[in-house]
Amino acid sequence: MIQASELYRLQEIDLSVHQHHKRLEEIAAQLADNKALTEAQQKVTSDQQALTPLQTKVRKLEQDIQTNTAKLKETDENLYSGRVRNPKELQDMQQEIQSLKKRNQELEDVLLETMMSVDTADAALKDSTANLETLRAQFELANKGLIDEQKRLKAEGSALLKSREQLLPSIEANTMKVYNNLRGRKNYQPVAVLVNQSCSVCRVQQDLHVIQAVRKGDSLTYCSSCGRILIYRTG
């Protein structure tokens, strides 16, 4: 009797969890079905993907210019230090300085062009982000009822799962196995109540020996028609 009654309590929790989950799926589908919001999110993602490599390129160019400038300074200092007297080496150093200056100018030109592209891409991202936030605010306002229901169902679902965890230790492993096996085959209702000598689900009147066994409650007793576990409830 105790085990069957606790299985019924577990069934009530599981049915509620299933109903909550099903409704949450429906709400999620309704909330996801918004073409304008989806397209706005995709635009933000696209703009971010366009901006990121440009920002990476700017950092790389700045590092290259810094490295090139340091090398130019070092070569220039060596040229005028008086330590090098060989005319050929002096000429090579002068040529290297010119080459480094030219390279720096090229890098700076590319950097300037890239920074302008970054500004353009950053402005596009800010615009698309602002548009997304506006659409999202409008969407949330228009769907406030659904969103509030979603939050409530999630909170209730968490409480139900907590109650389920607290109940499970009181149910024996073998009894739990029977419950799980029946649950999949009985449309989430493996337990029924004996009402006026009949099964509350299939409505079939039970034989006297089944009724007596259910009322006695020494072991699990099954409906003679649908095979569900029967429990006896008074009041």
Image (tube, rainbow, N blue to C red):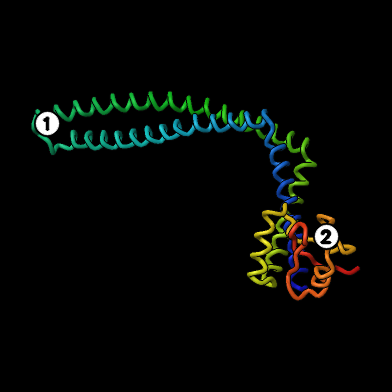
Res 131 quadrant in image: top right
Res 15 quadrant in image: bottom right
**Depicted 208 relative to depicted 71: above or below:** below
Q: Nearer the viewer, mark 1 or mark 2?
A: 2
Q: In what element is the residue under mark 2?
A: strand
Q: Identify the residue at horizontal 75%, vertical 50% (top origin).
A: 19
> Is the C-beta separation of discs 1 and 2 under 8 Å?
no
Give whichever of 57, 4 is nearer the camera.
4
Residue 29: percent from left, percent from top: 69, 38
At label 1, the amino acid type is Glu
Left or right, residue 188 beside residue 69: right
Q: In what element is the residue under mark 1?
A: helix
The residue under label 1 is 89
Res 96 quadrant in image: top left
Q: Considering the image in quadrants, where does the C terminus appear? A: bottom right
Give whichever of 161, 226 is nearer the camera.
226
Residue 155: percent from left, percent from top: 73, 55
The residue under label 2 is 199
Residue 186: percent from left, percent from top: 72, 54
Q: Identify the residue at horizontal 69%, vertical 57% (top origin).
A: 183
Residue 101: percent from left, percent from top: 28, 26
**First reached walking from the N terminus: tag 1 or tag 2:** 1
Q: Identify the residue at horizontal 36%, vertical 37% (top origin).
A: 63
Q: Considering the image in quadrants, where does the N terminus appear? A: bottom right
At label 2, the amino acid type is Cys
Give whichever of 47, 201 is nearer the camera.
201
**Depicted 204 relative to depicted 108: above or below:** below
